Image (spheres, helix red, strand yellow):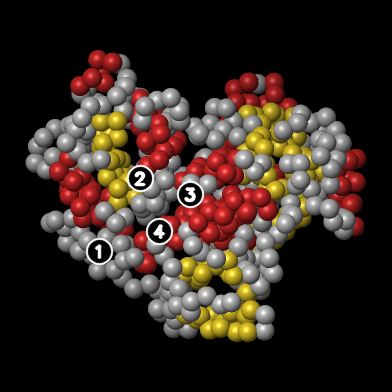
Amino acid sequence: MFGPSRPQAVVVGAGPAGLTAAHELARRGVTVRLVDSAEAPAIAGHTVAVHPRTLETFAQMGVVEELLASGRTSGALTLQAGTRFPVRLEADYSSLPTSYPYTLVAAQHDVEAVLRLALARLGVPIEWDTRPARIEQDHDRVLLRLHHRGHTQVVETSWLIRCDDPTPTVREHPAGERTIPTGSPVDGDLPPGTLAWTAVRGLTVTMLPDPADALPGNKQAPPERRLTSSARREAYTPAPAHHITQAAPGTVAPLQQGRLFAVGAAAQPHTPHSGPGSIDAGVQGAHNLAWKLAQVVHGHAAPTLLDTYQHERRPTGRPIPTRLRTMKSLLARIALAAALHTARLLRPLRTVLQRTLLSDLSGLGIRYPSSPLTTHDTHHYICAIGPFVAAGTLPAPHTRPRPGERLTNAPVHHPHTPAHHALHQQLRDPRWTLLLAAGGLNTGDTPENVALNAALQYSPWLSVRTLTTTHTSGPHPLHDPHHHHHHALGLTPGNWLLIRPDSYIAARGAHLTRHTLQQALAPLKPTTPLPGQAPHEPRPTREPNRKKH
């Protein structure tokens, strides 16, 4: 049965990206419809690897515990170049700045089942066997025809998010990659529980340790049998019961066309391991778009906020896994083998390569330093204050997380520190967070008064917390009695952080004043300015009069 004909947003595709987008929109009070052309949820499917940054995203959504129970964790990976130059590079996740220093390996249908259950708790049904047949848009709406078992409904909505498989209507620019899962176990001596890449005849064979029920029972197509045979002959370290994927050319679509957005499979072809087209890219892209779209829908930011989705999520470079998958020449593979062999012999080089590889793979290296939402430090920090000097706990300047980086890039992951639970619970708040270190110089507007005013003005989309070692007059104290989080975040009294809903730092400063906060919030063009702030007129979105897709 069809749902309401005037939702605020429609999401097409009930895979991991579509479920994430619908969940995060609904969690923020946006009326959303989620449709999928499949007749029912998949009951089997290929294995996927969910890397640390995506696990952090799922933690913010409140579903990570259920997801971890659905698969197995892998704390290491193996990178190998060919068989004539059999070289391994082992890398583990233990040193990564995250609460999830591992990869979750699970069946995709199990991941989707957890997300469907979370979405059901928010009261959003999935409309199966429903597909869009015609899409039109103008300056203030999207019209689409939905087909469901012989019936058609015309739906009007403000925004459309496509998370389904690419079709000729959304694919325009040839680029990127896709993978073909073979679902074939292979034999070998790879240590159990590790992910592995192996270069085979210009392709990269990716092997994932399978959960017990993850391998599909369908027979393989002939090309997949050939790939499996090639992998058995040439791969140096295939492992028992591993899932193999083949890299091949694919396409990438524009991420935004007016009021239409492409996320996940609709933007970049899916791969089950990592890289630009993976479940990680889809989930993180959906999360990035959803909180911005919700803020615009509720009138808490100008529509120009949505421009930052494409700015931030369009890949600007090729991470190591992508470069490996495109190494076709024998010379390139020999060079890779030589580099790995050298790295094995030289510990400093091996350490650098491991960190670079893990940064690419895990997603923890994603930064937004050039985003319009990032306001870089413009003040000198006041360091010689109070108990921090006496205790010898002042952080080195380069250790504090900078604007454009994840807040969780700081060492705030030890579960036994007093502020740990409160801080990570705060990151589940769907709003922005203004985190103020209590104290500071009391000249002009006190930081506490500025924070209190911000909490009153922007409470629908801004949560204000005061990091404190004792009782404080600031809003909503977050207690850090031993200065651990002050130290980890590089905060001394009066310092502050403005944290986005995806846990990235938008701005930080040495002393919170009305002026510095206005500067940090200026890219949003908030509709309710702080006292004394001139309101901004949101400029209209740049859209054509009419488009057909």
Q: Which residue is mark 4?
A: 28
Vertical relation: 380 (above or below) 61? above
Give the residue type that dot 4 points to: Arg
Residue 268 screen position, x and y as percent: 62, 59
Of badges 3 and 2, nearer the viewer stands 3
Per the model, the C-alpha gap separating discs 1 and 2 is 19 Å
Vertical relation: 38 (above or below) 28? below
Per the model, the C-alpha gap separating discs 4 and 3 is 11 Å
Tell me the SS state at disc 1.
loop
Q: Is residue 224 shown left or right of residue 181?
A: right
Per the model, the C-alpha gap separating discs 3 and 2 is 16 Å
Q: Earlier in the sequence, mark 1 or mark 3?
A: 3
Between 314 and 428, the one lying in front of the other is 428
Q: Which residue is mark 3?
A: 61
Vertical relation: 386 (above or below) 324? above
Q: Which residue is mark 1?
A: 527
- Figure quadrant of residue 93: top right
Q: Is residue 424 shown left or right of residue 249?
A: left
Tell me the SS state at disc 4.
loop
Residue 378 screen position, x and y as percent: 26, 41
Q: Residues within 10 Å of mark 4 (few under 14, many from 20)?
A: some
Give the residue type that dot 2 points to: Ile
Q: Is residue 235 shown left or right of residue 160?
A: right
Label drawn at residue 432? none
Residue under the point 84% across and 53% down? 217
Between 540 and 149, the one lying in front of the other is 149
Q: Earlier in the sequence, mark 4 or mark 1?
A: 4
Q: Earlier in the sequence, mark 3 or mark 2?
A: 3
Q: Which residue is mark 2?
A: 499
